[in-house]
Amino acid sequence: MKVVSEQEISNNKEALKCTLEQLYSTTDLKDVEDRKRTSNYYDWLNKKTKIIINEKNYVCDEKSKNIKRGSVVWVEFGFNIGNEFGGRHPAIVLRKTGNSIFVVPLSSQEPDEKKPYHVKIEKVYNFKNIVRWVNVLKIQNVSLQRVDFNASIGNIKGNVLDGINDAIKISHIF
C-alpha cells in the first residue's frame, strides 16, 4: 500500500479546489444542460464525500439484512459520464455479498431497439405500477451505503429473475 504524506493530501485538496473552480468557470450558466451537468456533478461529489466520511462507521442495519435476490431497492449510482448509468434509480438485487450487492438498474424508458440483453419487467411489487426495463449489460457491484433504506423496497417474481438469468447467459457476460 502506498504511503501518502500530509503534504500530498494537502496538494491534492488544493488541486481539487482548482479543478472544481475551473469546472464552474467553464460552465455556460445560460445553458440549461450545462448548468444541470455541473450541478449534478457537485451534488454527487457532496453525497460521495459524505459516504466516504461515514465509511469507517457504517454498519449494516436491520433493513439491509432483509435485502436478498429479487429485492428492488433505490440506489445512488452517482454521476455518469457519457452513456454510463448514473443518478438515483431502482435496481434489482441479483446477489448480496457482505456489504455490497450486485444489481441491475431498472429504467422506465423502453429501448428503441430491443436486444437479447433487454428484459421487460411488467411488475415490481410495492412500487408504482409501470412497465420497466433492464439492460443486463448494466450490472454493477455497489456498496450497501449507496442504497436508500428510507425509500420503499420492492420485489419481483422468480420468473422475472429467470428471464434476467437467460439474458445474462445469451449475452455471454459471465
Image (tube, rainbow, N blue to C red):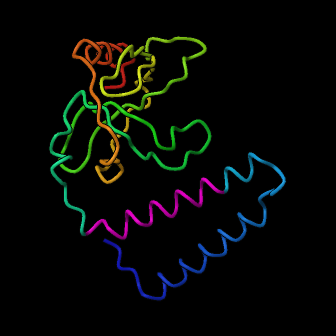
- Residue at x 25% of width, y 11% of height: 159
Q: Is residue 49 left or right of residue 166?
A: right
The residue lying furthest to the right in this view is 30
Image x and y of residue 32, in percent: 77, 47
Image x and y of residue 173, in percent: 36, 25
- Residue at x 51% of width, y 42% of height: 86
The residue lying furthest to the bottom in this view is 7
Q: Is residue 28 left or right of residue 125?
A: right
- Residue at x 32% of width, y 30% of height: 92
* Magenta span: 39-56
Position of residue 10 relative to residue 83, above or below, is below
Q: Is residue 48 magenta?
A: yes
Q: Is residue 90 magenta?
A: no
The C terminus - image quarter: top left
The N terminus - image quarter: bottom left
Image x and y of residue 46, in percent: 50, 64
Image x and y of residue 77, in percent: 45, 45
Position of residue 98 relative to residue 104, above or below, is below
Q: Main secondary structure of the magenta part?
A: helix
Count how many numbered circles sit on residues in the image: 0
Position of residue 50 relative to residue 163, above or below, is below
Q: Please identify the quarter of the rendering in which residue 161 is found.
A: top left
